[in-house]
Image: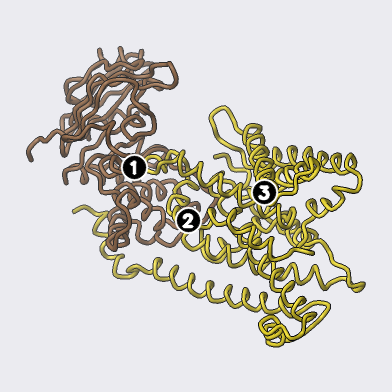
Chain colours: A brown, B yellow
Amino acid sequence: MASVELLYAREVTLGYGKKEVVRFSLELRRGEWISLIGPNGAGKSTILYGLAGLMPLKSGEIWLANESFTRLSPRRRARKIALMRQIPATSYPFTAYEIVLQGRYPHGFSQEDEKLAWEALERVGGLHLAASPFSSLSGGERQKVWLARAIAQQTPILLLDEPASHLDPAVSHEIYQLLKELCAEGKALLCVLHDLAYASLMSDRILLLKEGRVLAEGPPQEVLNPDLLEKLYGIPFSVVKHPDTGKPLPFPSIGL
Amino acid sequence: MNKISQRGVSEARDFSYLPFEQREKKFRLFFLIFSLIFVSGGLLSFCWGRFEASPIVLARALWEGRDPILQTIAKIRLTRTLLAASVGATLALSGAIFQALLRNPLAEPYTLGVSTGAAFGATLALFLGIVSNIAIPLFALGGAGFTLFWVIFLSRTEEGAFRPATLILAGLVVSSFLAAGISLLKSLADETVSSIVFWLLGSFSGRGPGHFLFFWPYALPLFVLAWLFHKELDLLSLGDEEALELGVPVSRVRGFLTLSACLAAAVCVAVSGVIGFVGLIVPHLVRLLCGANHRQLLPLSALLGASLLLFSDILARNILPTGEELPIGVVTALLGAPFFAWLLKRKKREIEWLP
């Protein structure tokens, strides 16, 4: 697959009010998985929110293929970039299927919508949930339904904020597998992760963020070393090799 | 293909599009039922009162005008019926829209204090000697907007979220203050503003065709916007950021809808006084029966709201043995307050949920 550049961000700064939270440059290609790792408050989620249009850019420029990000209408931007973050709670009885169908909003109304929403729900293995109220689902089921919503949005770029937080290993593995499949089909993924093992196993490249700056960037084999990780998190790390893939598996070495 | 998608394929055969079709069928069924209730309520309201006659007799009197007394009765009845239905539909619709915009299942013009604010505005206009048909609803709108601003200001946390219970508490505080203000104005003005009592309890007594014509230009924007923005309301009721992320121009949509819902609630108060709980009960019943999707929720709520006020008005006119009228706000409160209590008890968990 040709490495077509989908998203190109140069010297972008984001922040609230006068405060600058994060400054970064980024290139994202078709079929690429980039993970953002770093301590809490490093500005990882802020990057996602900026790219999803939840907050305005303070400076810098972003290009999506050949279009300027800032000139896109919100609706056109939402056809290119989908965001999955913390799942909101609701007290209204929307069904899972209705939630997924909402992902079609940026594309306007078409006859295809119902079919596409149905297929997206099928994709995450959630067809049996279609008619159940969203608020009655378990954490893992909600995460899957919300992912189906992002799939139904049919964007080339998918932004994910901790896509498998608070889930048991089997369910979170299922979700990571599904994301990897989407990636192999050509979607570009930008994913905030705390789980360093999955960051290593899934990503093509990793961005290490600390205090709003990019500390390092590169493939997992290069950047997941004890020195950089200690600089990043402020505690000593050990790294072993994954028995099957040879990828680095870091873990904190304090007290072990 | 991995395990997940294979499982999905086998399930597709068992379920194929079922929830969507089911929902459509349900919607049509309830639309039909509510329409029947609405039409029978309308006919009943038209012909049942101190003077009873068949709808055909009344309609003929209205049309031919051979019997001036009968014609007058028919005219008054017709206006009253149309006005009750219009106000009911508008209150239910604005309730459903406030509930979506504030993500609060307890929100409606009455619980938010918006209705009392509008009543205060209208009273103030009368107190200042303004009786123009254009100025009174504008004063009512001013009162409604002022109240909503304070209620939101008081209940908003630093992160911009609302606690549902706090919002209602703030509504209670502001509306108690303004209700006292109304009483104060009434005492200051002696007899001239004594007619304003109806603004606190609501009534359709003595409303003429002028009120009906005056009502719709102010209420119509809400119906048009509700129809245009039903998809956006689905998204907004899940969260502003979720809506932004899908490309909804949130602040614009929210602004238009809030303004038109306030205006509609204000004009309801301007023609019929404070009628509580309609905007609360109706959308809840519809959600229980037919789900939360606004494409179905909004038309069904309007239809059921109109029916509810028609029947409440029939009760208000005919329930007292002495032949006097009961304020309609009393009837809706008698029905609505227990419903509110049931909601509090049964859905406590959902209501105390933090957005």
Mark 3 surroundings within 10 Å by alpha-carbon count, few (fewer than 14), some (14 through 19), many (20 or more): many
Residue at the location (29% across, 55% down)?
A120
Decide: is A253 above or below A166: above
Q: Nearer the viewer, mark 2 or mark 3?
A: 3
Q: With respect to residue B49, does B354 lie above or below? A: above
- Which tag is nearer the camera, tag 2 or tag 1? 2
Instruction: Say left or right for A161 vs B197.
Output: left
Say if residue A109 shows up in the picture. Answer: yes
SS class, disc 2: loop
Distance between the alpha carbons at the discs numbered 3 and 1: 56 Å
The answer to whether the residues at label 2 and label 1 have Cβ atoms under 8 Å apart is no
Q: Which residue is mark 3?
A: B137
Same chain? Circles 2 and 1: yes
Amino acid at pointer 1: Ser
Distance between mark 2 and mark 1 Cα atoms? 24 Å
Residue at the disc numbered 1: A172
- Counting from the top left corner in percent of width and height, residue A145 is at 37, 51
Instruction: Residue at 68%, 39% (x, y): give it.
Output: B147
Q: Amino acid at mark 2?
A: Phe
- Residue carrying label 2: A94
Looking at the rendered structure, the secondary structure element under dot 3 is helix
